[in-house]
Image (cartoon, rainbow, N blue to C red):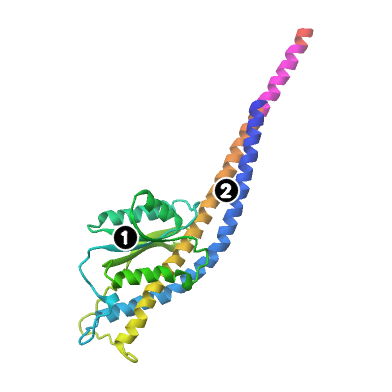
């Protein structure tokens, strides 16, 4: 009887867990759709501004000073904007991001400083005593561009002042609901586009090239950081939805196994009681 009560108690506990994971799956599904729409909507703008600035960086700068965000110099220090979720229950997303960024940092021959966005990445880097330039947490599930401007400002100021010579952004790029790919992409300096021989890429600047670049380049950094955060949120919600769905399915399978064990134990108990009754009746006879 004690074994039956224990199994029954475990079944009730697993059923409660399944209800919780099912509710979390539904919440993540709702948030995932909104996050996917925002992330995918920002991709065309992000890709286009990257292409335009790559073309501009490939143009000769005769008689014009090079903008500070386009200057290329010997690499003495690297900066990384590392974007991770604040919360867990995302399957292997955190581990994949940490493994990707840690491997990238180990490959570098110069010091690396981090601007960490998200509690999970912050905890990981703190445990390994990495150089953390700044930290940002609790941006929420629907941050606006204004909420991410302090992150971009640190990146722009550090590169302009020569504190870092290369800037990367590391995040989980949303590919599909089932696939989120950790990536490390260079933000500064802008890599020049490869222009085939005989092909001209020209732009008309109004009023002047340096004025246009002075406005466009900071917007580029702001957009790249903001878009990476949107991609990271979409990846987080997708990974959480899949993880909670798998957890719910596993709970249901465990309930089936426990129910089978409960039925077997109950049958054994009933059989034992019948044998005891039969044996007692035979003894009386």
**Residue 78 on image: x %, y %:** 28, 63
Q: Is residue 215 placed above or below 23 in the rendered structure?
A: below
- The span picked out in magenta is 266-280
Q: Secondary structure at mark 1?
A: strand
Q: Is residue 278 magenta?
A: yes
Quadrant that contains the N terminus: top right
Q: CA distance from mark 2 to mark 1?
A: 40 Å
* Residue sitting at x 50%, y 54%: 87
**Residue 69 on image: x %, y %:** 29, 75
Instruction: Give the quadrant of residue 48.
Output: bottom left
Quadrant that contains the C terminus: top right
Q: Left or right of 233: which side holds 126? A: left
Q: Nearer the viewer, residue 250 or 122?
A: 122
Q: Left or right of 4: which side holds 227? A: left
Instruction: Give the quadrant of residue 254.
Output: top right
Q: Is residue 137 placed above or below 56 in the rendered structure?
A: above
* Residue 248, numbered label: 2
**Residue 128 on image: x %, y %:** 34, 49
**Residue 200 on image: x %, y %:** 25, 86
* Residue sitting at x 58%, y 62%: 30
Q: Is residue 22 placed above or below 163 in the rendered structure?
A: above
Q: Which residue is mark 1?
A: 113
């Amino acid at each position: 009887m004690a074994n039956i009560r224990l199994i029954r108690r475990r079944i009730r506990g697993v059923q409660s867990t399944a209800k919780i994971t099912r509710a979390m799956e539904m919440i993540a599904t709702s948030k995932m759709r909104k996050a996917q729409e925002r992330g995918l909507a920002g991709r065309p703008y992000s890709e286009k501004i990257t292409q335009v600035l790559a073309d501009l960086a490939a143009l000769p700068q005769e008689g014009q000073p090079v903008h500070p965000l386009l200057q290329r110099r010997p690499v003495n220090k690297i900066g990384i904007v590392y974007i991770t979720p604040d919360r867990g229950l995302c399957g292997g997303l955190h581990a994949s991001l940490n493994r990707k960024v840690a491997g990238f940092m180990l490959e570098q021959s110069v010091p690396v400083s981090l601007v960490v966005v998200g509690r999970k990445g912050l905890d990981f880097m703190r445990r390994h005593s990495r150089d953390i330039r700044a930290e940002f947490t609790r941006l929420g599930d629907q941050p606006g561009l204004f909420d991410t401007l302090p992150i971009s400002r640190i990146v722009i100021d550090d590169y302009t002042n020569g504190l870092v010579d290369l800037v990367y952004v590391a995040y989980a790029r949303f590919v599909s609901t089932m696939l989120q790919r950790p990536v490390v992409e260079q933000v500064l300096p802008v890599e020049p586009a490869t222009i085939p021989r005989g092909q001209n890429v020209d732009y008309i600047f109004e009023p002047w090239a340096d004025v246009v670049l002075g406005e466009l380049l900071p917007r580029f950094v702001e957009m790249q950081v903001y878009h990476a955060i949107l991609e990271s949120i979409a990846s987080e919600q997708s990974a959480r939805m899949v993880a909670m769905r798998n957890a719910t399915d596993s709970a249901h399978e465990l309930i089936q196994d426990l129910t089978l064990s409960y039925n077997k134990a109950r049958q054994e108990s009933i059989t034992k009681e019948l044998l005891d009754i039969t044996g007692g009746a035979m003894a009386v006879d």
